Image: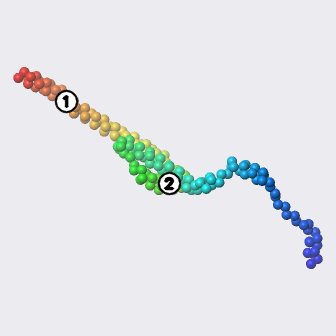
Amino acid sequence: MEKLSNIEKDTAPVEVQLDMHSEFDEKELLNSLDDDFNPDTVIDKKSKKDQLLEQGAMSATAVLGVGEQMLKQFGHKQFAFDEAQVENVAKAAAPLFVKYNGELPPWLAQYKEEIMFTFAAGALGFGSYSQIKALKKIDKEKEVKKPSEPEVENTQSEITANATD
């Protein structure tokens, strides 16, 4: 017990001090926070995951747009994807874009150059084939419109013979 009494004698009384702020100090603090913090942004702000999914959907939509343009170029000029289907595919693909940060999956990334070459060579080959096909069609139409020279002479001689009759 002796030790306790010594401790009680040696310890000084503890003062509790509360910080007191004036109304002016509080307003000044709130005004300084106005630039940094807006509670409405916290309420309206989407989660980071939702933002990433939205960006992934936009990326998927852009990729589908490029695909649609290629189909228009090589298939038919009036081709168009159905907007509802594009939206569904974009929503389904969004998690993949988030998962791989907009890049190819690691197991496929090592073949990126080969994939790009295949697309480029395929586009060139198909474009060349389409161009040759179109040129042959134009040549064939010219042949149909322009009769051969002996036929023209026979037709003209028939016209003059009929005119003299």
Residue at the limit of the structure toward the left, as seen here = 165
Q: Quadrant of the C terminus?
A: top left
What percent of the width, then of the height, locates residue 145?
A: 22, 31
What percent of the width, then of the height, locates residue 72?
A: 38, 43
Task: Report the side of 97 relative to 133 (left or right).
Answer: right
Q: Is residue 29 visible?
A: no
What percent of the width, then of the height, locates residue 57?
A: 50, 52
**Could you tell me which residue is drawn at 18 percent across and 26 percent down?**
149
Q: Quadrant of the N terminus?
A: bottom right
What residue did someone put label 1 on? 147
**CA neighbours of label 1 inside 10 A, class few (<14), some (14 to 19), many (20+):** few
What residue did someone put label 2 on? 94
**Could you tell me which residue is drawn at 88 percent across and 65 percent down?**
14
Looking at the image, what colour scheme do you see? Answer: rainbow
Give the total of numbered labels.
2
In depth, the one of 83 and 103 nearer the eye is 83
Earlier along the polypeptide chain: callout 1 or callout 2?
2
- Numbered mark located on residue 51 in the image: none
What percent of the width, then of the height, locates residue 91?
A: 48, 55
Do tag 1 and tag 2 residues touch (Cβ < 8 Å)? no
**Could you tell me which residue is drawn at 9 percent across and 22 percent down?**
163
Residue at the limit of the structure toward the bottom, as seen here = 1
Residue 65 versus residue 42 in the image, above or below? above
Task: Report the side of 111 relative to 154 (left or right).
Answer: right
In depth, the one of 114 and 92 nearer the eye is 92
